[in-house]
Amino acid sequence: MRSNRATVRAGVSMAATLPMIAGALALGIPAAHAADSPARDVLKGSKPLWATATADKGATSDSTRVSARVYLAGRDRAGLAAYARAVSDPESPLYGKYLSAGQAQARFGATRAQVAAVKSWLTSAGLTVTAVTPHYVAVSGDVAAAEKAFGTQLHNFAKGSKTYRAPARTVSVPAGLKGAVLTVTGLDNAPHKARHDDELPPPDAVYKNSGPFSSYFGSNVASTLPDAYGHKVPYAVKGYTGRQLRSVYGAGRYTGQGVRVAITDAYASPTIAADASQYAQTNGDASWSNGQLHQALPDTYTRTEECGAAGWYGEETLDVEAVHAVAPKADVTYVGAASCYDDDLLDSLHKVVDHHLADIVSNSWGDTEASQTPDRAAAYDQVFQLGAVEGIGFYFSSGDDGDELANSGTKQVDSPANSAWATAVGGTSLAVGKGDAYQWETGWGTEKATLSADGKSWEGFPGAFTSGAGGGTSKTVPQPYYQKGVVPKALATANNAAGNRVVPDIAAIADPNTGFLVGQTQTFPDGSQQYSEYRIGGTSLAAPVIAAVQALAQEARGGRSLGFANPVIYSKYGKRGVFHDVTDHPTGADLAVARVDYANGLDASGGLLYSVRSLGKDSSLSAVRGYDDVTGLGSPGYRYVRSYRRH
């Protein structure tokens, strides 16, 4: 299960980390499956690490029902990875020579014979085929049939305080199907769902910000509140708007005209069209034209209570409004998943690729790397590679819990942002000054202290870590070629002497204390549904902002697709004006803002809560000169968009 990156509302996946099916071997080409016998071909990574002998609680009942997906490797798995790299690498003669969706499927998709052979194998074992797509064959049946088909035994295993089903040994397929099957998901029943990590309230409960506010950073100093770091600090901004973000991230005359951007989340806001229109009108953005906003939605939704469906409405609202605010002429398609589970979110990504709904895809959801099993990692990498060969780039928020230690008990990065085939977007605290001028950014990391009862000091200043941009070094994904020579060796080799992927790649505004103003229909205490606005943040904001900036860059490039952008992004490192080199102490001193909140989230009748929020304090992560694991290469500078005119 995956979460959108607003306040965590969905549970974390209970899967565990295994070495990835080498979907990212030097951006690369997966290793062949090892055969455990002449008759079977092993699918590496299909037995979760938590399914240990000591945790084994015995065999699962033969009559227990199982639903699984057998993902198809296609006719040329290695060729897909190689072509995806070649068309994305500006040094390659194949750079930019993208295929259509039909050409990609014809060249790399599964053959009819492969699909028929997979179906025959599954049904002969007693499983029922419930769906066939270009990417997988879905089946259901009892445990006995699943064990027969996949050459394993399914047992119950303790993990923490819960018990889950999983293969007791690595899954295998008949040797005659070697090369046809990519991976199998669903044999373990731990929840594979996403969580959302912004401070984004659900639309069924009203939330408003209390003032006082700054209209731009530093415009309103909290002179009656205690000092922080030896001086008075400004009140938090009311929330930046598109005009301010376009100015500081170098939009210039570009608007995203003619560029298609897709947004994937779970579910769908019933008021998105009205909210987006009202927000644009209220905040000076260009009006939406007829047919500029589209939705591609599933026929039915599932797990609405488990996934907190209402919380995802706000995520869609933030993403849509942020993209339009920065790239007001871009065509936007919202692709909603049937639930927050991986399989349904993968279906949304497949929909984008199969129908080439956009060139740029913003994804404000994810989970910890330890919750991403190799089977699902392989499925994500495959859809990202298919997108790359079509000229589609995927942008994922890097997470909102810093190094994840406080949240999960382990320092780790988030997935799918950890994929070598996706662009991971980190977060910053942003100071926009008078006249929409860029002042500075820090890495997003917040420490919070509250006002003492007598109002004379901040208790426990600077306070505890509350949230920050996700980042760090992957434990499972080898270092991609485009990071070599740019990412410091100490970061790349933190978990592996050979070097691993480091997250993020690029960054933008994320701190909710220097955040974005968003407008959404919410339910008020009297039961009425009303449009209202409030400030929001998280890497859920950073991802659509970067997607929108990429739309501007694609327009600057004459409309030619940027595709999988990481190789080009890294090739721009060190060029003057392309990136803001974000550091945690840009002014040479510690930074903070004062914030006032309604205790009841609506008005002052329940009292006011005063706090000071320190900036640039991201868990164990630090934004430093050059590449770092909070902001990557930095945020888009004044020449970033224009630099694409030469690519």
Image: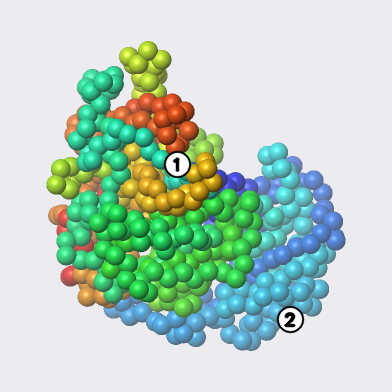
Residue 422 position, x and y percent, is 41, 61
**Quadrant of residue 595 within the rendered picture:** top left
Residue 257 position, x and y percent, is 26, 71
Residue 167 position, x and y percent, is 72, 57
The image shows residue 625, relative to residue 113, as above or below, that is above
Residue 215 as seen in the image, left or right of residue 181: left
Q: Quadrant of the N terminus?
A: bottom right
Q: Which residue is located at x 75 percent, y 68 percent?
A: 140
The residue indicated by pointer 1 is 207
Q: Amino acid type of disc 2?
A: Ser
Q: Which residue is located at x 79 percent, y 78 percent?
A: 124
Residue 230 as seen in the image, left or right of residue 159: left
Depth check: give the residue in front, 627 or 524.
Answer: 524
Q: Amino acid type of disc 1?
A: Tyr
Q: Looking at the image, can residue 90 be seen?
A: no
The image shows residue 92, relative to residue 113, as above or below, that is above
**Quadrant of residue 175 within the rendered picture:** bottom right
Residue 557 position, x and y percent, is 22, 72
Q: Which mark is residue 120?
A: 2
Depth check: give the residue in front, 13 or 490.
Answer: 13
Depth check: give the residue in front, 265 or 162.
Answer: 265
2 or 1: tag closer to the N-terminus: 2
Task: Describe the element under mark 1 as helix, strand or loop.
Answer: loop
Q: Which residue is located at x 32 percent, y 61 percent?
A: 324
